[in-house]
Amino acid sequence: MSYQGLRSLLPKNELWGFVILALLLVVVLPLSMDIFRLNLVGKYLTYAFVAVGLVLCWGYGGILSLGQGVFFGLGGYIMAMFLKLEASDPESTKIQSTPGIPDFMDWNQITELPFFWEPFYSFTFTLLAIIVIPSIFAYIIGAAMFKRRVGGVYFAIITQAIAAILTILIIGQQGYTGGVNGITDLRTLHGWDIRTDSAKYVFYFLCVFMLFVCLFIAQFIRKSKLGRLLVAMRDKEDRVRFSGYDVANFKIFVFCIGAIFAAIGGAMFTLQVGFMSPTLVGIVPSIEMVIFCAVGGRLSIIGAVYGALLVNWAKTSFSESFPELWLFAMGGLFIAVVMAFPNGLAGLYNTYVAPRLKPLWQKISTKKSTSPTPASNLNEGALHDPQ
């Protein structure tokens, strides 16, 4: 990519947003927190993947999905299946009636590993499945809905119903999915103990790295022609359709991107927390994920990360003291976002903070532009002077 292309992708004000976020996540938090709190932050960041995907789907594409927990859960369960198979080798499960299969299968009188579990012995297949399976599922949902021009509140309700159906399916198939308990007791990754403090540090920084990869992909989409088309579809869908664009295909694409981001977040959640549960798939967590995006700002990918961090930190802090009141607080927060600051934290920053920082940036830019030219540059100029 050329220098001009990079500048158009990351203008100065947005570049500083990425730099500040990187310093916060890579330097400030690891140096100021113990491993327990840092692991909590890592867990919060896994939800930020979903929030960033929702910025593209909802903020730019106008596609409000209330079922992103489905894709988060798919990614998490796929990673959990690989880790559970590694923890269920014949030596570790020799006390079971059927050694070599996960413990919850043995409890449910299943005597051999189901065929759809067998590919997850391969780590390469698992990594591919984290991307491919949620995107295929999202494509099926998107094609079924968008090709028939189903959108708006109807699409939101349908995705919510899909989240409820998948939760019921996971709980009902206890012998194959672990049921209401989920997939637990995950211990190693290729023989490396994932429960140690050093592993938690590694997974935290891996999560930050993957989050920034997703942020840059989202930024590229925002600044591309596709990003402009998404905004046009959100505001005047019929006009875009009459201009000759296939609106449904663009919606399907961005919905699949959001699903992939959520699945990566789910896989990172499983690695950092050490289990996967159907409670992370259903309606309530899916709505919470929308709130993360709304609080951060549904038009800001950086704001979505801060929204996920802030809301989850508040949830942890508030629920420790008043656990029965947290859902009321969450509802009040969502109402406040809709009524008082619809553009979230990013909107507050742009309205109240950015105007005060603008003179400072202009002053710095002026100093740079009026600084004396170095002698080496003058000599270079003399060499190219036609006189």
Image: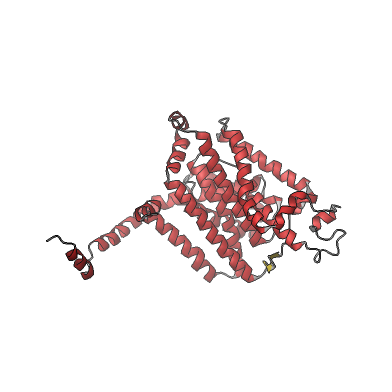
Where residue 220 appears, as percent x and y from the top left, is 45, 50
Q: Is residue 47 left or right of residue 166?
A: left
Check the image and name the residue furthest to the top.
Answer: 242
Residue 66 rendering spot, x and y as whole percentages: 60, 42
Residue 167 versus residue 88: which sits nearer the camera? 88
> Residue, x 40% and y 59% (percent of image)?
16
Is residue 358 left or right of 84 when viewed as pictured? left
Residue furthest out toward the right = 97
Above or below, 375 against 292 in this view is below
As rendered, which of 226 and 362 lies closer to the eye? Answer: 226
Q: Which of 66 and 135 lies nearest the eye of the viewer? A: 135
Q: Residue at left 22%, top 66%?
A: 377
Q: If the image is split into quadrants, where does the N terminus sit?
A: bottom left
Residue 186 vs 133, above or below: the answer is below
Quadrant of residue 188 in the image? bottom right
Residue at image location 66% in from the left, 61% down from the top:
273
**Residue drawn at (44%, 49%) of the image:** 347
From the viewer's perspective, is 82 left or right of 225?
right
Q: What number of labels is visible? A: 0
- Give coordinates of residue 84: x percent, y percent: 73, 59
Q: Quadrant of residue 48?
A: bottom right
Is residue 5 shown above or below 146? below
Taking 219 as reference, is 35 left or right? right
Q: 338 or 255, which is in the foreground?
A: 255
Which quadrant: the C terminus?
bottom left
Residue 359 seen in the current view: yes
Residue lying furthest left: 387
Q: Is residue 68 visible?
A: no
Tell me which colouring the rendered structure shows. secondary structure
Measured as percent of width and height from the top left, residue 131 is found at 60, 50
